Amino acid sequence: MMGIIGFSVGILGFLLHQIIDIISEFKWELTSHYIGKNDFPSAVLFTIGYSLVFLITSCILVLYQPAAAGSGIPEIIGFLNGTRIKDIFKLQTLIVKFLSCAFAVGCGMPVGYEGPMIHL
């Protein structure tokens, strides 16, 4: 069981990191392209618009599944101390936490993926 959990968390972390890299690299490559063409207004508008799309999507996902909000560390600590928290270990929570974390970190928000990985 520990091996399965370790393997699953490793795959999940790898996929999360890859999605974050894809989102952020595309943003900065296209922004660099606009800057290289001396089109600074387009670079700024694209960077802000691209980030807002992923940020709003991340927020909407969390509205759909509120148990996925936050880092997840306080929820896990509370669960380990005996507190019953609704929907904390559902598959929907895992999917929403994974996607919202990838979108929020990938768009450039000053958040990390370490806390959500503990919940995942």
Image (cartoon, rainbow, N blue to C red):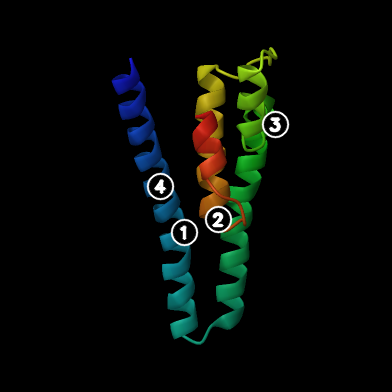
Q: Secondary structure at mark 3?
A: helix
Circle 3 sits on which residue? 63
Which of the two labelled residues, at mark 2 and mark 1, occupies the earlier sequence position? 1
Using the rendered image of the protein, determine whether residue 98 is visible from the camera's viewpoint: no
Which of the two labelled residues, at mark 3 and mark 2, occupies the earlier sequence position? 3
Which of the two labelled residues, at mark 3 and mark 1, occupies the earlier sequence position? 1
Residue type of the residue flagged with mark 1: Ser
Q: Position of residue 92 (x, y in %)?
A: 54, 21
Give the Cα distance between marks 2 and 4.
Answer: 13 Å
Q: Secondary structure at mark 1?
A: helix
Position of residue 16 in the picture relative to residue 109 (left or right): left
Residue type of the residue flagged with mark 2: Cys
Using the rendered image of the protein, determine whether residue 41 is visible from the camera's viewpoint: yes
Which of the two labelled residues, at mark 4 and mark 1, occupies the earlier sequence position? 4
Check contact, mark 3 vs mark 2: CB within 8 A. no
Q: Position of residue 116 (x, y in %)?
A: 55, 37
Give the camera-side residue of 10 and 98. Answer: 10
Circle 2 sits on which residue? 107
Give the residue at x 56% y 49%: 112
Residue type of the residue flagged with mark 3: Leu
Give the Cα distance between marks 3 and 2.
Answer: 18 Å
Circle 1 sits on which residue? 24
Give the residue at x 61% y 25%: 76
Q: Position of residue 58 (x, y in %)?
A: 61, 41
Check contact, mark 2 vs mark 1: CB within 8 A. yes
Position of residue 86 in the picture relative to residue 37 (left or right): right
Q: Is residue 70 above or below residue 104?
A: above
Q: Secondary structure at mark 4?
A: helix
Q: Which of label 4 and label 1 is nearer to you?
A: 4
